[in-house]
Structure formats: structure tokens, C-alpha cells
Image: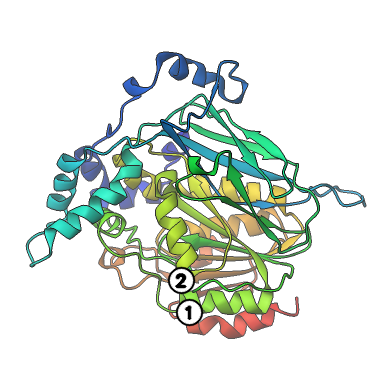
Amino acid sequence: MNSNLMDETPDDFKTRRAEGFPDHEKDLPKHLGSRFNIPLADDLSSYLGEHNPIAREVDPATEVVWLLDNTAYRPVHRYPHKPQPWQAEFVAAYFEKDSGKDLSVWVADIANKLGLGQKGENMEDVKATIAARLVPFAQDIRPARFVNVSFPNGDIEKLGPGGRNAISSQTVGTMGDHRDGDTVTVNTVPPELAPNGSMNIHFAEPEGWAVISGKLPAPLVPYPPTSLTTYTDIDDSIKITMTPSAIGILKSTFVDPPTPIPGMPHLYTYIARTLSPTWFYLSASPYNLHPFLRSFLTQHYPLGTTILRDASWMNLSGLLQSLTQGTEHYKNSRCEKIHTWLPNRKMLCVGDSTQSDPEVYGDMYRRYEGWIRAIFIRKVVDVAEMDGTRKNEPGRFEKAFRGVPRGVWRVFTDPGELYEAVDALRGM
């Protein structure tokens, strides 16, 4: 379990206990998969991470790889300097093929916890949905593995090896010449190793806009490149996750069809057309949900890089912890990383009131003056668990945005309120 999960704020502590999260977590399986299925040499050598001398290449017959999309950037120097070569953080995860299939007991358990089968639902269809979404939590991981990937220009790069959680993360700089706004695909060698498809690399020059979004946005349309970056939070900002409720999280994750927040896809399409930003989707969701979220984003929102949490392989209770415990520390650390990549971009930050988005964005604004140009926070009013909390009180927002000019941040309930604010960013 990632240590960041222990960075629980007093508000996290109070909310989690008021809604019974610890009790629900005790009842959820912690060992859907098992480290005993990992060869001993791999398990022990995985402590060495990328320096593992006995790591092995992924075996196409028995193993698979997930490739996560990323954003390529040019390092920025303090003093004037010629443009630096492109580089990006490459993240891959390694699994045993076709593991985690015998899930009938856990499927029935989740259905029972959610009270399903009492309202005339077609339980066979419901259970099939639960089983399909449960598989990424139950797959046996394969640490101490590496994979070769191919670039469009024919270059081959080695990724990995993965560490204890079978995830590898490294900076790669062999990407050739590209322009701001380009997107290229990188494939495993052979391509069949990656059941979720190729990796998309989005190129972002140092100057421009970016969006950091903590919730998900409309059908994808290619937009002409510009210099805005958008950072958006996914959970309850652009996708309904019901993060104040343990049962809500389980239901939206394992049963409900993925649903965008009404009006957010259209707003994100408008932002993309108006500002042509680079997009980052920051979520406290664990890596297990990568295939689910990637499919959802592809259907509803502009292309971008999804940043997820290394928290709960083979551990279902970790899903609730990942989404509700230590999210402020986690999101702060990821915003810091984005700042190291793109310190000169103008940032538009989108989030909601369910988690710590106001506090995170306020802190980042104060820490890096001039980096964040606008903050949009959706006030979540359609979730019963938000009633009686201080999360929507004006005082909470005033405290979170202490020292942030009032014209920079705004709280909204209807995305339609934001179009004029987006237009005002165009001239910055």
C-alpha cells in the first residue's frame, strides 16, 4: 500500500468515520490475488526496482502489459537556452495473463453489499458487469519484468523493470522532432502484449495553457495546438463517482454505466476549442481502474494524460482508501510533478468540493505565483452524504483560497456558468 494513503487530514478522518468507510473496508477482500503466486526470485529481486540485475523480459505467452498515456515536455532552464530535447515519464504495469478469473464469490459478495437483485434487475447481466470490472483488482502482478516498446520512427526503448507493485516509471528522451499539440502512439514489442492498446504521447511546448482536471469531460475532436494546459480532477468533477459514500463508490465502480457530469463534456469541448490546452486528468483512483477510465475519457473528453494512484493491486479495500484517504497529499505531489514538467504554462484547474481540490489548488497557487490562472470548483449538491458537512460552506472555500484573488477562483453548480470565464482566459 502506498504510504501516501496514511497522510490523512483531520477532515479525511472525520468524513471517513462518519460515513463508515473503515467498516466497509474491513468487509472487502484484501487478497483477491496473492504474492505467493509470484516466483520467489521475482518477489525478492523486485525490492531493487529499476536496478534489478535479474529482471526478465515479459513473456508474451503468459504475461501482459498496460501502457499509460503521457505528456512529453521540454525541460526549462532558468537562463535563456536553446530548446531542449523532448522527454516524458513512461509508466507501465505488468501482469500474469488471464489471472483473476475465478471471482464468483466476490461478485456475489459485492452484489449483496449493494442490495442488488431486489428490484427486478437482470442479475446475470449485473454480475457479468461486476465480474468484468473486478478483474483488474484480482490479476496477479508480475514484478521484476521489463518490456520493449517501439516508436513511430523505429526506435526501440526498454521500459522497466517494475518494482514491488509491478509498476515501472522512468523518464525517456528518445522521441525525435515534434510540434506542440502532436500526439504519437508507442506500441509494445510485440503489440499483442498490451491488451488495452498502445500508449499515446501528447507533446506540450514550455509556453501555453494546460488544464488539470480531477473529474472527467465530450466526444473527442482534434483541436489545433495552442498554449493552454488544463488540469482536471476526475472523481465527481467530470465523472460521477459518489466519493462521499462507500456504497456510492462501489456502485459507480462495479455496476453503474460510467456517467459524465451533466454539462461537463460540452464545457470541456468548449475549453478545448477556445484555449487548445494540454490536458491532465488527475484522479485518486488506483491504477486498477486505468482501462475503465481510459475508455470513459475517450468517449467523453479531450485527449490527455491520466494520472492515477499506485495503491491497491490485488486489494479491493484499497479502492475506498485510495479515493478517500490522503488525497490532499497525493494531489499536491502530482501537481508538483506537473509543475516540474511545465513551469511556464498557464494552468486552469478544475475540481469539486467532495475531496481536497480547493485546498490543493489554493496551496499550489500560493506556492507558485502566476502559474495557476483560473480555478473552477464544482459544488456537489446532489449527493446526500454531502449534507451536514462543511465541504460546501463558503467559509471552507474562503479558507482554502486565502491569498488567491477572488477573480481567479469560482465555485459553480452548473457548468453553463463558466463559459464567460473561459472566454476571459483567451486574452491572458
Give the residue drawn at x 58%, y 38%: 189
At label 2, the amino acid type is Arg
The colour style of the image is rainbow
Residue in the image at 29% along x and 60% along y: 252
Q: Say the numbered circle drawn on residue 132.
A: none
Residue 208 x, y percent position in the rendering? 75, 66
Indicate the position of residue 39 as horizontal and vertical percent values.
Answer: 40, 18
* Residue that numbered label 1 is attached to: 415
Crowding at mark 1 (Cα within 10 Å: few <14, some 14-19, many 20+): some
Amino acid found under the numbered disc labelled 1: Pro
Q: Position of residue 115 (x, y in %)?
A: 12, 57
| Residue 85 shows up from this direction | yes
- Label 2 close to label 1 by CB (< 8 Å): yes
The x and y percentages for residue 255 are: 25, 59
Is residue 318 something that shows in the picture? Answer: no
In this figure, which residue is indicated by the disc labeled 2?
Answer: 378
Q: Tell me the quadrant of the picture where the N terminus can be found.
A: top left
Above or below, comparing residue 141 to residue 135 in the picture: above
Left or right placement of residue 321 versus residue 309 in this view: left
Q: Identify the element where label 1 is drawn.
A: helix
In the picture, which quadrant includes the C terminus? bottom right
Of labels 2 and 1, the one closer to you? 1
